Image: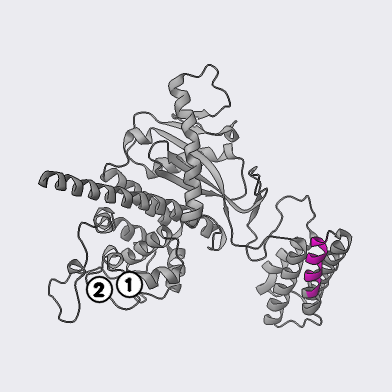
Amino acid sequence: MKPKPTVYNPQREMFRVELTSLVDLSHPLVKLGGTINWAMFEEQLGRTFDGKTGAPGINTRLMVALHYLKYQHNLSDEAVVARWVENPYWQQFSGRQFFEHEMPIDPSSMTRWRKRLGEAGAEAMLKATIEAGVAMKVITSAQASHVNIDTTVQTKAIRYPTDARLYDRARERLVVHARKAGLSIKQSYERVGRHLVMKSGRYAHARQMKRAKACTRKLRTNLGRVIREIERQGSPAAITRLLTLCKRIHAQQRHDQAKVYSVHEPEVMCIAKGKAGKKYEFGQKVSVAVTSKGGWLLGAMCMPGNPYDGHTLQRQINQMDRLYIKKPAAQTVHVDMGYRGHDYQGDKTVIVDKRRRGETVKRIWRWMKRRAAVEPTIGHLKSDHRLERNQLRGTLGDSINALLSAAAMNFGKLLGFLRSEEHTSELQSHLNLV
């Protein structure tokens, strides 16, 4: 069933303290809680609940607030729920009336709620921060008239893939699931595989590559034996998907396309962005749209399959149009040279960066040089808002994580604006008294 609506009780209680008597009502988090359109989330997620059967769902505002705070402070599900109990401002932001001394939910509920949220719900959370910025007159049409779009890699929380560990991990998973399905595996190669992986790593570290490759070949042979033994017994439907994945790992060669780099995250791609420190990154490509002035995120989208940057521009601009409703009279999009030959067809002007000014008008050249301002924004998304080492599972988790990371970036900027506004008003009142 749908979550029960929050009802404000005007009657005071003897043993419970109202949050309005604990918190400062001029605090930025309290002000921001009154600006966000919470009813939009109720409408968005209300369609996913059954109207009559089942227990009532968890309060929507509470879950949305917990996810804003989780990504804003770069916390795990367990940590954000634990800190919620200690912080009356977080409880007030979540729509609570009285101070609570117990955790409102089990942290595992956040995982299940994210599946219900989906990509559309996460996009609504980003849209809510943009609408709050427009309502507070922080995001203006002048800022949104020039937008920088760039791509980055959202790395996945997997260990660095090597052939030896990949063969051994595939064999290990296949043996466990086959035995659960009732099959008889005569030889699992558990101890042999563990020693071969250790020897392979040590030989490679000592630059004895022939010996390291011999260990890798032996691990591949062991995986093939387990696969054939399962096929002889008739693979059950429960392990068909895993068996197909292990056969792909066993058959893939060095220069193949669409290789598998992780058993539990087979969608992970190997992406090269030309970095000196990181030649290859393993995850999914993410496109972001950032205002040239102010650094507000107007869009963030996961692009599975490692497409060419220029072929992501149309989808990114379409998302930006969905999220930013208040259109300016004209809009210019600035991109780097990786977008040459892009696929955008629309009324916006797309300016591709170049190395030298040449005959470019000085006014336009200044905006082109502002394109590099998107890079520190991407850095903050990765280091502060969980875009690096994504912990959420599957391509759905990649999309949700990218959108919530962008929403947390805007959320923090809104709080920063409210703090500076509060400081300015205090300074002005002090000057008036003097």
Location of the N terminus by quadrant is: bottom left
Q: Nearer the viewer, mark 1 or mark 2?
A: 1
Residue 126 belongs to magenta span: no
Residue 194: percent from left, percent from top: 77, 74
Residue wearing tag 2: 99
- Left or right for 357, reference 410: right
Q: Nearer the viewer, residue 49 or 140?
A: 140
> In the orientation shown, which residue stands out farthest toward the top?
359
Magenta residues?
A: 195-206
Location of the C terminus by quadrant is: top left
Per the image, label 1 sits on a secondary structure element best described as helix
Residue 70: percent from left, percent from top: 41, 62
Residue 428 visible in the displayed image: yes
Dominant SS type (magenta): helix
Determine the residue positioned at 38% across, 49% down.
410
Coloring basis for residues: one colour
